[in-house]
Amino acid sequence: MPSSAAIRLHIETTLANRVPAALTLKIKQAPELFVTGIAEVDAVLDGGIPRGCITEVAGAASTGKTSFGLSAIAAITQSGAACAWVDVSDTLSPESAAAAGVELKRLLWLRTSAERKLKLTDKPWSRLEQALKATDLLLQAGGFGAIVLDMSDVVPQHAMRIPLATWYRFRLAAEQARTALIFLSQAPCAHSCAALALRCEPASVRSFSSNGETALFEHQQYTLIRERNRNESSVFLQKKPPLRAAWHAETLWSRVR
Amino acid sequence: MARRNAVVAGAVMYAVLHPPNFYAQAAAHPRPELRRRPFALLDGDPPAEFVIAANKAARALGVEAGMTRLQAESFPEVTALSRTPADEASAHTILHNVVCLFSPRIEHIEISPGTYALDIEGMNRLYGDATQLAARLRQHTMAAGFLANVAVAENFHAAVCLALGRAGVSIAASGCEREALRDLPVRVLPLEPEHEETLHSWGVRTCGEVAALLETDLIARIGQAGKKLHALARGEWPHLMFPIEPSFEDGLSEHMELDHPVEVLEPLLFLLARMTDALLERVKEKALAIASLRVVLHLDSNKRHERTVRPALPLQDKPTLLKLLQLDLETHPPSAAILHLELHAQSAAPYRAQHGLFLPQAPEPGRLEVTLAHLKKLLGDERVGSVELKDDTRPNAFRMVPFAPPPPAKSEKQSLSVPTALRVSRPPQAVGVVLRDNKPTLVFWDGQRYAIREIAGPWRVSGQWWSEANWCREEWDVRLANETAERVCRIAFDPRSRCWYVQGTYD
């Protein structure tokens, strides 16, 4: 009777052309990390956002998703890599991007539009469809350090309608292209495909400063919660409790003060 | 040594075509009515214009080269014309086309405008012997509207001197160049002004007299130029011909006439593939690559549809070039059926780069180009690219530029705090606002009612007051809240339309 090792070897040899090393456990390398440029967040994320994986940042409006995304892209473009920002609602502010330190020449900005295809009715998912196709093309082309798919203004009902197969395809493509794929959305939609799931929440409200004069909007306090990190090396296979990081962002004019 | 006959196969023979008084002929060519009237051609910047040429009738009246405009105008019958480079260029083209009929090897003689030298070796089968060829060449030139002298000789310079100095057709028999040149004036030789003066003072008037001088004596008196002059006068100065060759860049074009009008792009791509292939072959022979491709489609509606594909880097890759052409034509399709197809290419040195092992990741240029073309087709030309901030007082003024990331290199990290990003509403969304004491207190936006928890402003901004595109608004930063959510926004009041808008949301 052949030993189990011999059977295993036989199966692997037979399947070698279709599935290389079918029964051998793959040793997964810890992915390279991109720092986000926010020290508090980097501490919670064990160094930054992973390359070749999907990072999902979900949260309501004014919870710091865009500021976080721009800060991460700024750090990546400063490292010399090219990045792309797929803007579903055409809301990116170039001034904010420049203020965050993004090297604008290294950033490819894709602005979807409702007017592009007049035959289609202006349905929200026509923009979403364009954005998903564009992201697909970028991932196939390869060479981008990070791609941000900004769906912050897409209502969760529409984002949830994107088939899971799309996210699986994106995950594989991102892994092959060694690109950090970042989703900004109102509610989590990539499910298990996201290696790093983050949730943004509004923190304690910092009132507009007045100093006895005209009130001025100066700071905004945010909270980032790490829901899941697949790349975390842990000897225990149990889910870790969510980790929180509090960070704050300043307005451009308060820098001058 | 017995010299071979002029037009016998294997012998080198030159024919030179010289239109005398070229500038005047070129000026009169487009205006036939001038040929019978005296006219003078003027050059230079007014008021310092001077006569550079005059026709025979004007010269008979006393007009000379070098006269001022005032002097030329003192002759009431003489018409004064200004020199036009376009006339001369067109005259050159006509003469060039004529000489091209007689030989494939042509040299333009720079010192004498409109003069061409032809290598007529082996042309006797087509045009007969030297005399017949020269006569036909002169006949063709006259039919094209130019008077010309034609000279044929085995020595290049002897032929040039004969054409310059003798009217009509002159043939110098093989080995008899010296005799043929003997009576020509010395001005037909390319003389320096000081040498011309010297020869004049010696009483030397003809080429024969120059040739009769002793070569060593001539060199001793006027230097090494004397050697050349002596050989030229004897009709023995050698010449290396530099024929005009068609420009490589001009030759990079392909044309195709279609049997019937084509409306669909797919069949066209097969033709474009063949044409691109042919162009690439030619370019690769010179170790070059294609820097840009220009497609010209002649349409059924008598219009032209022209598109240019310019990859970021010169390419030698046919599939990539073809894909770029296809995507560009699909994004900008022609308005009618296609009758005729032209493809023009521009060549450049191919792109070579040494990549570093430790440099950050960057998109591969050829692939990126195709991806960008795909994205432009999907989203629109102006919606894909990098952003460039404009030097403008208007907030968020920017322009889109083509995406061309610089080579990977690390830059200095700025140690600044994280700024709050504004998500701009494009176009601004109109909202309803309730005011109390001239301050907004409630906002109705997207069917929701938001109370204003905090407010900062108004910040009054305006610009372009000097033009019709002037703008002004009052901006407020507000913290909006309803039962479920809270958000910080920038709202603005436009005093001209008396409307409130949401400029964007801080996120």
Image (cartoon, helix red, strand yellow):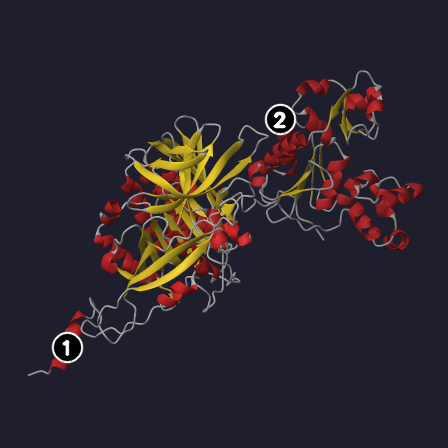
Q: Which residue is mark 2?
A: B143
Q: Is residue A65 visible?
A: yes
Q: Quadrant of residue B233?
A: top right
Instruction: Write down the chain letter for disc 2.
Output: B
Horizontal relation, residue B79 to residue A103: left or right: right
Count how many numbered circles sit on residues in the image.
2
Horizontal relation, residue B288 to residue B226: left or right: left
**Figure check: A175 above or below B211:** below
Is A250 in front, or is B336? A250
Is B473 in front, or is A12? B473
Could you classify mark 2 by the number of other residues whose Cα lies within 10 Å: few (under 14), some (14-19), or many (20 or more)? few
Is B58 in front, or is A30? A30
Residue type highlighted by circle 2: Ala
- Residue A74 horizontal/vertical position (percent): 45, 57
**Residue A8, numbered circle:** 1
- Residue B193 horizontal/vertical position (percent): 85, 43
Q: How far is disc 2 from disc 1 in space, using C-alphas?
A: 93 Å
- Residue B268 horizontal/vertical position (percent): 35, 39
Q: Quadrant of residue A165?
A: bottom left
- Residue B167 horizontal/vertical position (percent): 74, 31
Q: Secondary structure at mark 2?
A: helix
Instruction: Write down the chain letter for disc 1.
Output: A
Residue type highlighted by circle 1: Arg
